[in-house]
């Protein structure tokens, strides 16, 4: 089974996670690259105005993969806007796909992600795995929301989270298609 990990990361968390998942799944890896430099202002602009940023074209045929694992952050309850460009350009050739996010989870559990994926991709994902930075803190300690939002995971944490994600992906996807 040929798997592609397609990832986007603004501050590094999802990039670290994506690399560990790629290794564990023995997948191919491709980072989504934006044409323009991103900042907090453009994150908010894209969410408010539902706009689609430009990304670099893929220099390979994404349709050749049996499973595409999209990995990236959630911004203001929405899938990070660079994925909109992926869905717009490639939804017709992307086959079975899953979505994995390492996000803060400080407001709620981002309940609208599944609906957004289905709408943008034109089909339901095989699996959605949401990991929350808030869960990396002990319940016994009082932590500020800003500390959670700004947490940068270590390589060791990325590896541990990737183990968990791969088990879930394998249970949901690989058992169906193997
Ligand atoms: C402007 C902004 C909005 C965010 N909105 C959400 C949100 O709605 N839900 C959530 O769980 N996390 C939210 N986050 C947290 C990010 O998803 C989280 O920090 C993630 O790990 C960043 O991934 P990256 O380092 O790969 O870019 C937001 C972060 C930023 C900067």
Image (cartoon, rainbow, N blue to C red):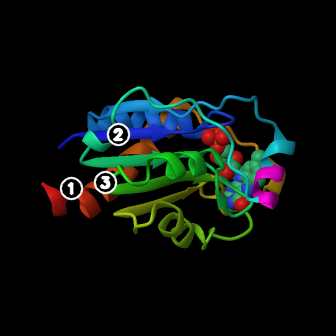
Residue 60 in the image, given as x and y percentages of width and height: 36, 29
**Residue extending furthest right?**
41
Residue 2 is left or right of residue 47, and the answer is: left
Residue on which the image places disc 3:
95
Q: Secondary structure at mark 1?
A: helix
Residue 53's disc is none
Between residue 123 and residue 172, name the one nearer to us: 123
**Residue extending furthest left?**
178
Mark 2 nearby-residue class (10 Å; few <14, some 14–19, many ≥20): some
Is residue 58 inside the magenta stretch? no
Q: How far apart in space, not on screen, are marks 1 and 2 (Cα)? A: 18 Å
Q: How far apart in space, not on screen, are marks 3 and 1 (Cα)? A: 14 Å
Q: Earlier in the sequence, mark 1 or mark 2?
A: 2
Highlighted range, magenta: 44-49
Q: Mostly what secondary structure, the magenta segment?
A: helix
Residue 128 is left or right of residue 63, and the answer is: right
Which quadrant does the C terminus fall into? bottom left
Residue on which the image places disc 2:
62
Q: Secondary structure at mark 2?
A: helix
Which residue is at 29% across, 35% downward?
A: 27
Residue 127 in the image, given as x and y percentages of width and height: 38, 63
Residue 145 in the image, given as x and y percentages of width and height: 81, 56
Placement of 162 over or under 121, stated as above or below: above
Residue 157 in the image, given as x and y percentages of width and height: 51, 39
Residue 174's disc is 1
Mark 3 nearby-residue class (10 Å; few <14, some 14–19, many ≥20): some
Q: Is residue 149 visible?
A: no
């Amino acid at each position: 089974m040929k798997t592609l990990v397609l990832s986007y990361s603004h501050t590094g968390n999802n990039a670290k996670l994506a690399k560990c998942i790629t290794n564990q799944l023995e997948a191919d890896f491709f980072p989504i690259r934006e044409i323009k430099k991103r900042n907090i202002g453009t994150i908010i602009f894209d969410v408010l105005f539902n706009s689609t940023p430009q990304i670099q074209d893929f220099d390979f045929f994404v349709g050749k993969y049996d499973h595409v694992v999209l990995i990236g952050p959630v911004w203001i309850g929405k899938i990070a806007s660079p994925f909109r460009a992926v869905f717009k350009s490639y939804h017709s050739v992307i086959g079975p796909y899953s979505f994995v996010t390492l996000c803060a989870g400080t407001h709620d559990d981002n309940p609208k992600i599944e609906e957004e994926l289905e709408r943008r991709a034109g089909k339901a994902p095989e699996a959605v795995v949401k990991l929350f930075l808030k869960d990396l803190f002990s319940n016994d300690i009082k932590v500020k929301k800003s500390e959670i939002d700004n947490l940068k995971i270590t390589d060791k944490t990325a590896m541990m989270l990737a183990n968990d994600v791969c088990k879930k992906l394998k249970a949901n996807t690989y058992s169906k298609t193997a």
